[in-house]
């Protein structure tokens, strides 16, 4: 069964850092581009970042450029999102998603909650 | 950036009724358009990709049409489990990948 499980969320003060993980099972990350998508409380979905299947290409939404870093470890079959200089505007549920069939986001994790507050 | 606009914001629908949701792109996205369903406290679930192809396990009452800038999602006979928020997303002009703001389908 193909599955994604996020972890690492929590409460963090503004200006601090937090690292998220997304463990994949049932498929290998080496074959797929992988994305992070977030959802602020009561709001819609916002794409955050992507890493290509070979790991060479990474793109970010403008609001997180220079602060967030996406990466993956093929040996652990795990996707990561390192978030630095966090602001209250980064408060959201963070989902990882696979870019799969037809280039659509076909598998999603259940999400991990990040709260940035003093 | 391709802006996705969904209408209406909220739809009140009775069980068994047919309902249509709309999504408009600010520029052509071809047929690189997906629809997602999200229930409270759950992750989004892929319903439709390629504008009209149902994802694995999605019931036939869900159908998608459109190309270019105008798209629709139709639920032919609304079931109790279909009350949710629906999002469209384009994956033609990236980055960024962009979502609509969502349409909430509620019980009438």
Image: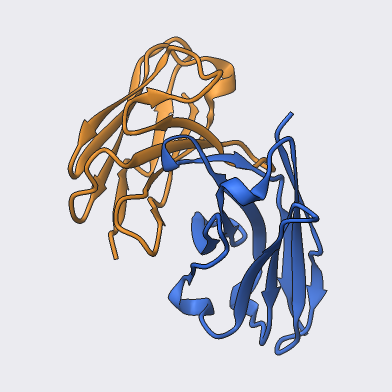
Chain colours: A blue, B orange
Q: Position of residue A80 (x, y in %)?
A: 71, 64
Direction from residue B63 to residue A90 in the image, left or right: right
Number of callouts in the render?
0
Q: Quadrant of residue B21?
A: top left
Give B17 or A19, whichever is nearer the viewer: A19
x and y percent of residue A60 in the render? Answer: 49, 71
Rendered view: A14 above or below B21? below
Asked if residue A95 lies left or right of residue B49, the reply is: right
Image position of B32 with respect to A59: above or below? above
Q: Is residue B56 left or right of residue A25?
A: left
User: Measuring 54% from the left and 27% from the top, which residue is drawn there?
Assistant: B83
- Residue B18: x and y, percent? 35, 15
What residue lies at 39% left-to-right and 13% top-to-bottom?
A: B17
Figure quadrant of the C terminus of chain A? bottom right
Q: Residue at x 75, y 65 (%)?
A: A20
Quarter of the picture containing the N terminus of chain A is: top right
Please provide percent x and percent y for residue B10: 40, 39
Say if A14 sits above or below B51 in the image. below
At horizontal 37% and vertical 13% (from top left) the residue drawn is B76
């Amino acid at each position: 069964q193909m599955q994604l499980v996020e972890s690492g969320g929590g409460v963090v003060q503004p200006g601090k850092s937090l690292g998220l993980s997304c463990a994949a099972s049932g498929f290998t990350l080496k074959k797929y581009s992988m994305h992070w998508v977030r959802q602020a409380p009561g709001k819609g979905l916002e794409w955050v970042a992507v890493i290509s299947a070979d790991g060479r290409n990474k793109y970010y939404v403008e609001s997180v450029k220079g602060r967030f870093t996406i990466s993956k470890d093929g040996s652990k079959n795990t996707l990561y999102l390192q978030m630095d200089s966090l602001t209250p505007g980064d408060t959201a549920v963070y989902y990882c998603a696979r870019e799969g069939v037809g280039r659509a986001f076909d598998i999603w994790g259940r999400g991990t909650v990040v709260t940035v507050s003093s | 950036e391709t802006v996705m606009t969904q209408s209406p914001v909220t739809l009140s629908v009775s069980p068994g009724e047919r309902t249509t949701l709309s999504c408009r792109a600010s520029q052509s996205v071809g047929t690189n358009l997906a629809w997602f369903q999200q229930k409270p406290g759950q992750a989004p679930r892929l319903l439709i990709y390629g504008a009209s192809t149902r994802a694995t396990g999605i019931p036939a009452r869900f159908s998608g049409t459109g190309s270019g800038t105008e798209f629709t999602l139709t639920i032919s006979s609304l079931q109790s489990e279909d009350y949710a928020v629906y999002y469209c997303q384009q994956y033609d002009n990236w980055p960024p990948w962009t979502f609509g703001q969502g349409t909430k389908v509620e019980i009438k």
